[in-house]
Image: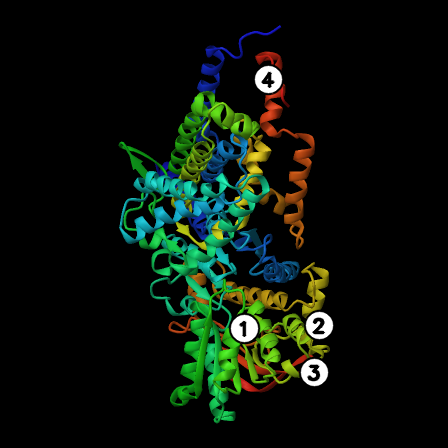
Amino acid sequence: MARVKYLILLVLGALALATVAAGAASETGVTSTQVTIGGTTPLSGPASAYQSVAKGAAAYFRYVNAKGGVNKRKINYIYKDDAYDPSKTVDATRELVSQDKVFAIFNSLGTDQNLATRAYLNALKVPQLFVASGATTFGNDYKKYPYTIGYQPNYRAEGTIYGRYVVKHAPKSRIGVLYQNDDYGKDLLAGLQRGLGAKAGLVKSKQSYNVDDPDVQSQIAKLKAAKVNTLMVFATPKFAIQAYVYARKLSWKPLVYMNAVSSAANIMGLSTAATNKKQTEGTISIVFLKDPTDPAWRNNSGMKLYRSIMKKYKGGNPNDVYAVYGMSVAHTFVAALQKAGKNPTRAGIVKAADSLNVTNDPFLLPGISVKTSATDHFPLDQAKLQRYHDGHWVAFGGLFRVR
Amino acid sequence: MRSRAPGIAVWLLVAAVVLLAYLFAPRFISDFHSRELAGAGVFFIAIVGLNLLTGYTGQISLGHGALMAVGGYTTAALAVHEHWRDVWTIPLAGVAAGIVGFLIGLPALRLSGLYLALATFAFAIAIPSLLKKFSGLTGGSQGLRLLEDAPLQVTGLSGTVTIFGHTMTQNHFLYYLTWGIGLVGFLIAWLLVRGRVGRTFRAVRDSEVAAASVGINLAWTKTLAFALSGVYAGVAGSLLAIQVEIVNPLSFTFLLSILILVGVVVGGLGSLGGMILGALFVQYLPDLSTHVSTAEGAPDFIFGAAIIIVMLLLPTGAGGFLRRLARPLTTRLYLRP
């Protein structure tokens, strides 16, 4: 009898052990050797230039995997095409969740695209990590959508930086604003007014346009007629270039503040080519990534690492600032995964993403950290100002921290 | 040797095979693949509708994506603002798009060929902007989200749907709903083109002068074709909204109109049988082309190249190819290629 008892105990013990072992690696998308994550990006269609973000991130993950991965697990990052069409984002995201069984959705690109999947992912408690959009809602509405978190400095924060700078350094400005009549333009405008604070009266004229308007000629004429000397351009690239062109036609040269959406070096180059060097000279914008075309970073160790990863792990065009962004967001994901511990769970990585303090991101400007807390869901909320001089952006001044 | 074209027995056999495939396909594929097939079903319905217009009546429309938008937004607006149950809005979405189809058919009375195509093209370009303009109704550039804001959704977050006491997964339900409507729509289209309506459609296509001289009312026939075709597009748009649970102007760009037209041409103009293949082509090819290469610009290039190759190999589309395959069996119903 004793032998039977012993045997039963042994079997029960083995069963218990097996359950524990199985339970340890039971989170969806996580095995003992791999963590599978996924996201959407426009690989085809009119917005396909943004795909460099996903490719930069993928190259960084390959680099991390080659070094052994995170807690001996390789990161398998699947990015799917949505052609920038939110209905395709929904299908592709559902495919990632139900078919590819990803651990988390990571770095999906676009405001409408992420809004289209947010309710679904939160209902299923699938993390929607580091959304590639500057819309304020991704950081603000964490109580309703706890599984969602943004990444880049949000539009409202950017507007606030411009407002504070004007108050401090040019309090006699007469400000005119050209903004896109949607959430994005209004977020920037609200930020500007917040930054100006008591000096909000400096804004003498606000002109909006709709994204389907053919041009902004009349808006620029009205702004000139309002005798403003400072022009805030909260517009997408096409209209941003037009702002310079029509101002020049009216022989008007205000000091321009260009929103980050349209400040990439190639767009500024187009604006300069369409007008002249004088028209774009002195334009101010914000910057938080190391610009790969900026000669100041040529011998920087972070940018050397960036270039070697781009080359060795096939990240694409190394002069594309979107790829730098992708590496930075991948670096942050790795930090969050490490923080989530040896056996990461979905709830665990969300908690980790909400308590980050990464100070060693080599792709961000020195001094910028990726910081979040239970009440701060804006990982990046620091930026510098930069001035366009002689065909290049030159960063100046200290870091602003705004939420 | 000419014998009577396929007898009733052959058609019954085909119908039985299709019905069995429809009923049992979800058993053999994963849950997610039923969802993809439901997506192909949406294209199928729109393509069958456009084929009535372009294939049978000879009127080119580059605006069917916009007609789908009318259907999709009708469903979404009724579900979100008026709290209708989403599936009950499908007929209304069809009617709404049918009326709009009738209206854009009016220029067809004066324009023909490429000029008509341009007029419908203008409609396709204008719709996304119009949708943003009336943001109170359409949600503007963010669109409408059924999952969050529509209280009476047939799908929703539970993942399962129960009808007539029978519970199935949401994706299986979407498959049965879409293809059920699709097959009924196909049957109606087939009955139409076999009869008097189909003969007037074809007469208008082959020669307007000859058609008018035998007493066919050209204006009535063309606008009828546009309106009918619009109903199909509207139902397709409505089903798309129910499937993806959002509507957004970015989903109804000019590209969608082009995709539907590609589906009709690949399926075979003026042939209903090829339409399933046309629908599968436009549903799966964009995704497949990103599997070949994700280099910048490559998926678009591969998609374009695939269309060219298909048209070179199958100049009469899949429908024409099937007809040629079946010719020894069914004799020469059509002498035209």
Question: Which residue in the structure is indicated by mark 4?
Answer: B326
Q: Give the quarter of the image for residue B303.
A: top right
SS for dot 1? helix
**In the image, are marks 4 and 1 on the same chain?**
no
**In the image, are marks 1 and 3 on the same chain?**
yes
Q: Give the quarter of the image for residue A275.
A: bottom right
> Which residue shows up at 59% across the image and 34% down it?
B266
Q: Chain of mark 3?
A: A
Whether residue A241 appears in this view of the structure is: yes
Decide: marks 2, 4 in contact (CB < 8 A)? no
Decide: marks 1, 2 in contact (CB < 8 A)? no
Q: Residues within 10 Å of mark 3 (few under 14, many from 20)?
A: few
Question: Which residue in the structure is indicated by mark 1?
Answer: A217
Nearest the viewer among B106 and B247 is B106
Nearest the viewer among B244 and A19 is B244
Q: Of the residues shown, which amino acid type is indicated by label 4?
A: Ala
| B178 versus A161 height, above or below | above
Q: Chain of mark 4?
A: B
Please state if B198 lies on the left or on the right of A392 as rendered. left
Question: Which residue in the structure is indicated by mark 2?
Answer: A304
If you read the primary sequence from the N terminus, does the residue marked by circle 3 or circle 2 appear first? 2
**In the image, are marks 2 and 4 on the same chain?**
no
Please state if B9 lies on the left or on the right of A394 as rendered. left
CA distance separating discs 4 and 1: 62 Å
If you read the primary sequence from the N terminus, does the residue marked by circle 1 or circle 2 appear first? 1
